[in-house]
Amino acid sequence: MKPYQGYLILLYYIVLIIIGFLASKYIQFILSLALIYAIVAMGLVILIGYCGLISFGQGAFYAIGAYSVGLIYKYAHIENVEILFTIGIIAGTLISILIGLLCIRTRKIAFAMITLAFTMIIYTILLKFYYITGGTDGLRIPIVKIAGFIPFRGRELPISNEYFFIVAIFVVVLYLTTRIINSPFSYTLRMLRDAEVRAISLGISPSKAYLIAFTYSGFLGSIAGTLYAFLNAHIDPSLAYWTTSGEFVFITILGGISSIGGVILASIIYTFLKAYLIAYTAYYWQFAIGIMLLLIVFLSPKGISLIIDKTSRVFYKFIKLYKKTS
């Protein structure tokens, strides 16, 4: 990882904390949700951008992480955030390994369809096992505590406990993902994406590399799911429905399939737009989001990341010109 990227991640953290102190509780909640979506989208950047595998299965790991928290809370009566968080991550990651072993045998459309199929299987299980999962009613998670005594959803300070916790986890995930993207492993994934036959001739195992990428993506999905359960205090089977996975794919395309910064910005834009559009146009927000996607596809095929890149280049040229003239 380049030195400036470490400083950039630190800057993300500082900016998010400052925003938290200045924003209302509602804005903190929406921004927390956006960061949760960004965590899932970072996993999709690895899969779509670097592996060339479009996955509609992230909703499954998202739901597994959330329901692991809900079920352990309901039946084991554990309220400790650290324990619930760890169990949610382990459950989602283990399931992602099992599903990944089957999914990595396919490519392109077949891969997208088989991940979608597994997502709908998880959705059906959560929906039909009513006496365990609560069915359409879902599960409530009203009280969880950090370190056993600090309420997760505390409102005593200008910045809420849940916002601070989610920002901290987000920054750690951002650091890990950036390290992976700048590691030799990412070049292996790109080689497999662009020339799999040549990569195999060099002794690279596609199954092993894709399974690692798929598992990491599921790992991030389960982290996001556990955080959502803590934040929202209620979960239901819609977390595993195909439209949830579609939202994650939409955010990734909107931001740029190979851009971490782009998908973070896209997550924030999408979440705030959705929240306010639902408030003012309850039945037509999908129409507005669809128009936005069409504009991005036609005007900036590489997503928001292309706009950011062009803007930064113009800014850099302006600074360079200013230095020459001064």
Image (cartoon, rainbow, N blue to C red):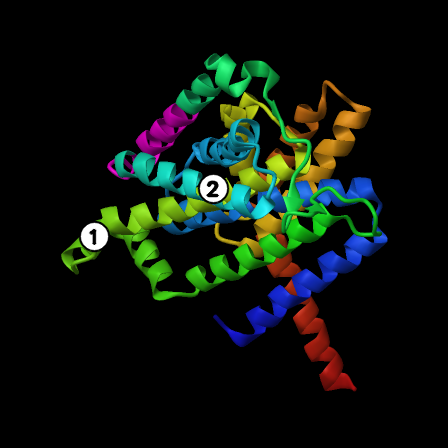
For image coordinates 64% across by 67% down, the residue present is 10
- Does 311 sit left or right of 90 as displayed? right
Left or right: where does residue 197 sit relative to residue 71?
A: left
- Does residue 114 sit above or below 157 in this rendering? above
Q: Amino acid at mark 2?
A: Ile
Location of mark 1 (residue): 205
Mark 2 and 1 residues: CB-CB less than 8 Å, in contact? no
The reply to whether residue 313 is in sight is no
User: Who is closer to the viewer here, 49 or 70?
Assistant: 70
Amino acid under disc 1 = Ser
SS state under label 1: loop
Residue 106 pos. (x, y %): 27, 35
Dominant secondary structure (helix, strand or loop) of the stretch shown in magenta = helix
Position of residue 151 relative to residue 232, above or below, is below
| Tag nearer the camera, 2 or 1 | 2
Residue that appears at 54% across and 76% down: 3
What numbered label is drawn on residue 87?
2
Mark 2 or 1, nearer chain start? 2
Quarter that holds the C terminus: bottom right
- What range is drawn magenta here? 103-119
